[in-house]
Amino acid sequence: MSSLVVENLSIEFGGVRAVDGVSFAVEPGETFAIIGPNGAGKSTIFNLISRIYEPSNGSIHYGERNLLDVPPHRVVNLGIARTFQNIDLFEQATVLQNLLVGRHSRMSRNLLRDFLFIAGARAREREHRRKVEDIIDLLQIAHYRDQKISDLSYGARKNVELARALCAEPTLLLLDEPASGLNQEETDDVSFWLDDVKHDLGVTIVMVEHDMGLVGRVADRVMAINDGKLLAIGTPDEVRNNPDVQQAYLGIPA
Amino acid sequence: MQIIFKTSYDQDINILSKRGEYIRVTLLIVSMLAAPLFLDVYYLSELGLLLVYAIAGIGLMISTGFTGQVSFGHAAFLGIGAYCHSILMTTGVPFSVSVVLTTLFCGFIGMLLGRSASRMHGFYLAVATLAFLIIVETVIGEWTSLTGGYAGFLVPELQIFGVYLPEIWQQYYVDLGLTLFVVWGTANLLRSPTGRAFLAVRDSELSARSLGINVEWVKIQSFGISAAITGIAGILLAHHLAYLSPETFGVLESLKLLLMIVVGGLGSITGAIFGAIFVSLLPVLLSLLRDVLPGAISQQAGLEPMLFGVIIVLFVVFEPDGINGRWKKLLHFFETFPYYRKASFVRQKRYLKTERMR
């Protein structure tokens, strides 16, 4: 198991320092939450870890590997999978196809072999289908296996996106607001699933979340940031009671 | 009402899983095989040409319909395929070797185009592929020593393994054989990781990348295989035309290919085939219309391109899923009878998508 170590991470967009010298470490098996007001730089940190943005300063290590040496499409091969804040599924494909794309980093492919469908192509498809079915069972999404994403409701899409990330068999899962747009009941489901994912699959979870109820229930440690700067790291209660964090959310007391 | 009860993963892996599909496709193939018994030479040759356009449509469908990379330049691959094959056969290369070499050559050129296209999107890509088409057309026209230039190039007769095949029905079977091969191969592609990577890149490059897909390489591959298949169509087209000239492979031909896949239905193999049927029937329909319409209209020069344009607009507005979409609705009507409702295919507006980070 590897730990995620972020040191002195910074990025600038024009004159704005969206993330400014943030350092933190996530231990294997931990559930780590990042909180902060809108525009604090939470999603930007995720986009830096998944290499969509190039940092202007700092380093990101996962285990022995320096992530900054890895191109974006190889990040998942290190065991880092993610979901997106506003759901980014393949809309015109079925749930099953989406999940099979999730297996992509684990599948060998060759244009000619795929075109002729020879050399064990069928056996390979079956084998990966079995893995996909395991995830389908875990998240209980069997009933919309054959539906197109464009036919699914918002909550179902959230589940499918989580399932797709899990299909890559990650060791580190980045969840960008897993409970946004969900009702109380669905949010409860998410917290159960996150528990399952953590205990059954042994996945380390880093999540950005606004729902402090969910954070309090599932997170082992919380990091609060504001204006790209780190405010506090600690247990949920410690962070909630931190005066700097309260000030960031509620403003300076008169 | 039909309910499919799945008992094996193979049902999802097989190309044809429903019994109805199986019967329809078998019937279609059998009737295609038997066609020379019923059709006279003219219609058989038209049917062969239809198959050629079906192949070209599938070629374009791979880059535009599956991978989402619009191309105005695919007539260039028809041209490259036709000329390359004709030139090779003139120099004495056997048919089968020439087909393989031409396909590989087209694939290679396609990958080069894909290499430059992989960093462009939407409008810029359309313009770049259009420029590519014009360059290829010009090169074919000006390279007189190799291609005969605008004077044209005589295509050698069809000859496989030393046997001349001068009859139309023989040529038709060559068309049919290659069509079946291309359809089968493309269907294979779609049920394997490469094809899914194409769809993934079409729907969301960002997600595709985060799941381990090398988006640039997938686009290069997609253009490569798309060009190779269009090249095969070019080879067969050369034998149908018997006489090549550069302007055959111009912008209008590219538009015809695009019209085909849009009207047929983007994103499916059947769509490309429906499109080919449509563009092959359109001239026939037009000639019928000409007899009915008053001379002032029917003698107009631009009647055909104008109708192309009007039809594309009508489809984009009223049936974005094309003929294939209609076909699916019709099937759904029968399969779910009597539960079909008008709203069965009405879709909600899409939800927010992640802001594009390119």
Image: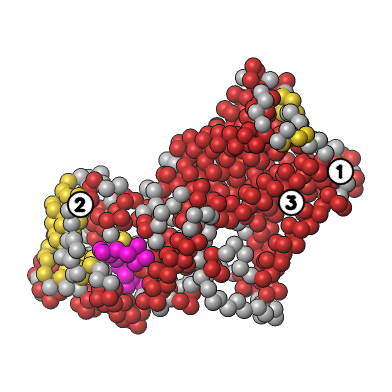
Q: Residues within 10 Å of mark 3 (few under 14, many from 20)?
A: some
Question: Is B26 contained in the magenta span?
Answer: no
Range of residues picked out in magenta: A166-181
* Image quadrant assignment for residue B11: bottom right
Looking at the rendered structure, the number of numbered marks drawn on it comes to: 3
Q: Quadrant of the N terminus of chain B?
A: bottom right
According to the picture, the residue beneath numbered tag 3 turns out to be B277
Give the x, y percent position of residue B272.
65, 52
Give the quadrant of residue A1. Answer: bottom left
Q: Which mark is residue A65?
A: 2
Q: Residue at x 13, y 52 (%)?
A: A8
Q: Element at badge 1?
A: helix
Q: Closer to the camera: disc 3 or disc 2?
A: 2
User: Could you say whether the residue bearing mark 3 is in a helix, strand or loop?
Assistant: helix
Q: Which amino acid does the dot numbered 1 rest on? A: Val
Give the letter of the chain under mark 1. Answer: B
Q: Badge 1 is on which residue?
A: B41
Question: How far is the residue under mark 1 from the one under mark 2?
Answer: 68 Å
Tell me the amino acid under the disc marked 3: Ile
Whole-Å distance between the Cαs marked 3 and 2? 55 Å
- Place of residue B271 in the rendered image (x, y in percent of width and height, measured from the top left): 65, 55
Circle 2: element type: strand
